[in-house]
Amino acid sequence: MAGTPVLDREEEEARRAILEAALGSLEEFRNRPEPVFPEVYDDLAHHYRQRLAVLNREGDDSEGPSKAALHDHFVKISQELLRIERETAVRLRNDSRISDELLRKIERELDLSETHLAEKARG
């Protein structure tokens, strides 16, 4: 995204601190007695580490994908996946595998995801 503004130092430091705090808390949650669904913690930790890596690369002048290029690719792939989800839900309804009511519920969720993604695309 050519118009993506570079974060100022204050914002960059704040975002880094926020992501690191979330990762630290996630590790605490994972280490509680009887952790439930450890794959959830793994998935969330991966997500936060990726966000932190992108943030750390933003100020890095070394070769590699820019934050804008990574962001654009993320948005593009996410949009395609949402389209596939919507088509699959409609096909399930058309095949009488789900009800009209469930299709509407899923479509509302997809609409919210698309709205959120559109906001991310704008920066």
Image (cartoon, rainbow, N blue to C red):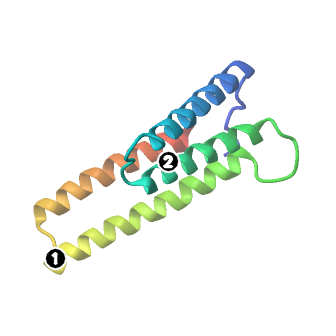
Q: Residue beneath label 1, please?
A: 97
Q: Is residue 12 above or below residue 109?
A: above
Which residue of the protein is positioned furthest toward the bottom in this rendering? Answer: 95
- State the residue in front, 2 or 81: 81
Q: Which of the two discs, 1 and 2, sits closer to the camera? A: 2
Q: Residue beneath label 2, please?
A: 44
Three-letter residue code for mark 2: Leu
Callout 2 environment at 10 Å: few (<14), some (14 to 19), or many (20+)?
some
Q: Is residue 25 above or below residue 114?
A: above
What residue appears at the point 59 percent right and 33 percent down from the top-left corner? 19
Q: Quadrant of the C terminus?
A: top right
Tell me which corner region of the image, top left, top right, bottom left or bottom right, holds residue 48.
top right
What residue appears at the point 47 percent right and 49 percent down from the top-left corner? 41
What residue appears at the point 11 percent right and 67 percent down from the top-left corner? 99
What residue appears at the point 50 percent right and 36 percent down from the top-left corner? 28
- State the residue in front, 39 or 88: 39
72 left or right of 28? right
Residue 56 place in picture, x, y as percent: 74, 38
Three-letter residue code for mark 1: Arg
108 left or right of 59? left
Residue 114 place in picture, x, y as percent: 39, 50
